[in-house]
Image: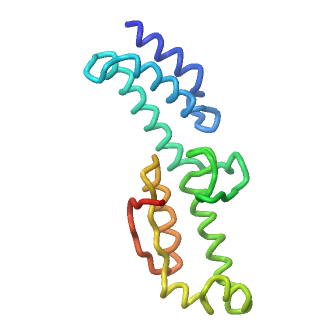
Amino acid sequence: MAESRELKTLAAKYIQKGDHGGSNYFGLIKELVTHRNMFETGEREYAIWQQEIDRIYGLVRDEIVTNHAKPNTPVKFGTSGWRGIIGKDLFVRSVRQVTQAILAVYHEVASNSELAEALGVKTFTEAQTRGCVVGFDNRFGGELLAQGVVDVLAGNRITVHYAGESTTG
């Protein structure tokens, strides 16, 4: 099969076996989608390319869950939230660490009236009681990352108001 050879060639170009950090899954997915779209939905070739796309998304999912490295780029927030590459910058461990850092700020409100005013609570206990709404949009991995946030909040006795998949705009 020509597809099989081409799939192996593309995978070799983008995937470093056993090294999520050295692999460029989204570059590969982009090429796979281009090839898949040369065929109609019901064609056998379309299904072959889609199966490989699904397999690569499985590798991205594994990277999101198992990555324990530092994010590739420093955390930076834009108008729509944290900017970064899924699996490389945004992964369960990095999201948990940022959540814990935010909670550390809330621990300071009792001794910093300016901070308390900005955050809208006077004590960490008040923040725990009022809680936090956690939701995610429909992008890949959102539910996994949201669960990381929920775990940290719950571990710090913050009431969690879980919205699940939600619109963001």
- Can you give x and y, in whole percent of width and height, for residue 74 in the image? 73, 53
| Residue 9 at x, y percent in the picture | 53, 14
Location of residue 30 in the rendering, given as x and y in whole percent from the top left corner: 52, 28
Quarter of the picture containing the N terminus is top left
Please tell me in which quadrant of the rendered image residue 12 appears: top right
Is residue 55 found left or right of 88 in the rendered image? left
Q: Is residue 103 above or below residue 52?
A: below
Which residue is at the far left?
Answer: 42
Quarter of the image for residue 97 reads bottom right
Position above or below: 101 against 131: above
Q: Residue at x 47, y 12 (%)?
A: 6
Q: Is residue 108 toward the left or the right of residue 27 in the image?
A: right
Compared with residue 40, is residue 97 higher up or lower down, i.e. above or below? below
x 69%, y 56%: residue: 75
The residue furthest front is: 169
Q: In the depicted view, which residue is nearer to us: 96 or 127?
A: 127
**Residue drawn where x is 41% and y is 13% of the image:** 4
